[in-house]
Image (cartoon, rainbow, N blue to C red):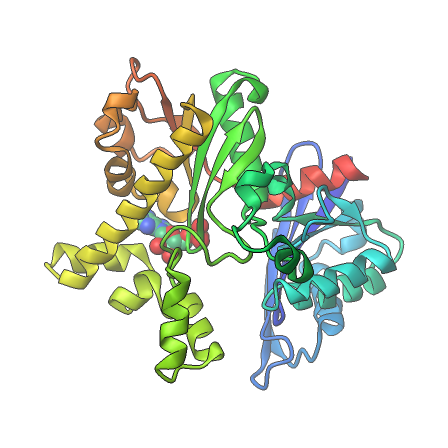
């Protein structure tokens, strides 16, 4: 009975989990952080025993060596866990990676080349992939892409209305993200209802610190709110989401720089920009105290999400399910109720008691006579990466 090592890495961190291939049980997990930074690095490993340590971690190779040491120190050496593959989460797979892919030297190089489209993510993935392949040379390494699920979008949905030769030259099109989450959540919603995923039209709202929505027809993504980068679409913890591109030219002409606008829209907007906190719980508390900007932040958030909900009902020509997931989607019943309110005319009826119930697992929150079934389904990207890794091996 084998296990998968799931790796979710950034430029300065490695998050990992060991997941049992058949049962989905987590055997261990941990985090190596502050890799290559001037301050001390840190590793935290959780298995039956917990290990925590601060030390210099100059690069990802040392990060993986420390991770292996932490397994041993916790009393369950990594060799004892019968790991049969390593699954790497990769944010951007461009147009060329439409499925999980066995990593060889060429694939690793292509992932690095795609840093052009994902400068904040793919270089860190590449560094971790090189280090992990050197640490575990005998294991197959699989790249699981956040963009792959959306490669089924029709041309009309992924094309920006700019000259095709310019778009082609620079790889400018909509790719979409959170695909691993949209895939697992839509499949689990179907399982919960006892229906084949192929028979359902679904709208998934992944509302976390990053947020995106996806229209899914018969298990395939046909539209999603994120675009060339994870900036387009919904309001997020620190990202603006949709904005008139003219705003960028206006700010440039007024003396801002490309980098300052990039930082503004990606890191200093959304809930954080309105209120000083990217956490919805803080925003909600401030709104309850009567803070105008906090109330406005939630109003804009809800307005945008409803905009996309209406759009995807049109794209799909009606829906069988609406599925909420991720931090806010799973834990903010007030937000769920506001996003769905006023859609009764197209058959969406939330049951207030079911919506407010403090349950944790997959559950229905619409009334028995609601034409559209509304669900909350916890996302589980790591288990999905493990599943896709095993399926590919
Ligand atoms: P995620 O990126 O999916 O981990 O989501 C993180 C975000 O979910 C946090 O920044 C909060 O805004 C939100 N969140 C987490 N827990 C709760 C909660 N109990 N109630 C409301 N919002 C929550």
Left or right: where does residue 35 sit relative to residue 320? Answer: right
Where's residue 100, x and y in %? 73, 43
Point 54% across, 58% down: residue: 229
Point 39% across, 55% down: residue: 242
Name which quarter of the figure residue 290 lies in: bottom left
Q: Is residue 43 above or below residue 298?
A: below
Residue 20 visible, this angle: no
Q: Residue furthest toward the right? A: 138
Left or right: where does residue 337 sit relative to residue 203? Answer: left
Name which quarter of the figure residue 260 lies in: bottom left
Please state, as top left, top right, bottom left or bottom right, where the C terminus lies in the image.
top right
Point 31% across, 61% down: residue: 271
Left or right: where does residue 301 sit relative to residue 157? Answer: left
Point 86% across, 55% down: residue: 104
Q: Is residue 249 above or below residue 74?
A: below
Where's residue 135, x and y in %? 82, 63
Q: Is residue 241 above or below residue 328?
A: below
Name which quarter of the figure residue 312 lies in: top left
Where's residue 41, x and y in %? 60, 77
Residue 224 visible, this angle: yes
Q: How many marks?
A: 0
Q: Residue furthest toward the top? A: 369
Where's residue 53, x and y in %? 60, 72
Please state, as top left, top right, bottom left or bottom right, where the N terminus lies in the image.
top right
Q: Nearer the viewer, residue 155 or 229?
A: 155
């Amino acid at each position: 009975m084998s296990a998968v090592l799931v790796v979710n890495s950034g430029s300065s961190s490695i998050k990992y989990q060991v997941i049992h291939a058949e049962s989905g049980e987590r055997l261990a997990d941990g985090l190596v952080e502050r890799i290559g930074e001037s301050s001390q690095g840190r590793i935290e490993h959780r298995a039956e025993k917990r290990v925590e340590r601060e030390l210099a971690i100059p690069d990802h190779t040392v990060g993986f060596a420390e991770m292996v040491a932490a397994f041993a120190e916790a009393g369950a050496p990594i060799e004892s866990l019968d790991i049969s593959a390593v699954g790497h989460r990769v944010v951007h797979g461009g147009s060329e990676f439409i499925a999980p892919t066995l990593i060889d030297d060429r694939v690793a190089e292509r992932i690095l080349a795609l840093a052009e489209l994902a400068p904040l993510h793919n270089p860190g993935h590449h560094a971790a992939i090189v280090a992990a392949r050197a640490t575990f040379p005998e294991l197959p390494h699989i790249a699981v892409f956040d963009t792959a699920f959306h490669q089924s979008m029709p041309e009309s949905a992924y094309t920006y209305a700019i000259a095709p030769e310019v778009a082609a030259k620079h790889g400018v099109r909509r790719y979409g993200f959170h695909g691993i989450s949209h895939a697992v959540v839509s499949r689990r919603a179907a399982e919960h209802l006892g229906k084949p995923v192929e028979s359902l039209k679904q709208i998934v709202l992944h509302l976390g610190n990053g947020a995106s929505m996806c229209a899914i027809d018969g298990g395939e993504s046909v539209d999603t709110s994120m675009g060339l980068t994870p900036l387009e679409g919904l309001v997020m913890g620190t990202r603006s989401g949709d904005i008139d591109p003219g705003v960028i030219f206006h700010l440039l002409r007024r003396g801002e720089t490309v980098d300052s606008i990039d930082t503004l829209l990606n890191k200093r907007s959304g809930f954080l920009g309105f209120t000083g906190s990217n956490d919805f719980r803080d925003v909600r508390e401030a709104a309850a105290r009567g803070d105008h900007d906090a109330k406005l932040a939630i109003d804009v958030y809800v307005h945008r999400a409803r905009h996309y909900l209406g759009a995807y009902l049109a794209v799909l020509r009606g829906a069988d399910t609406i599925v909420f997931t991720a931090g806010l989607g799973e834990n903010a019943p007030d937000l769920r109720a506001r996003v769905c309110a006023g859609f009764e005319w197209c058959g969406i009826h939330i049951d207030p008691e079911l919506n407010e119930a403090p349950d944790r697992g997959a559950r229905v929150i619409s009334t028995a006579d609601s034409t559209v079934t509304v669900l909350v389904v916890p996302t589980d990207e790591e288990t999905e990466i493990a599943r896709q890794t095993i399926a590919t091996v």
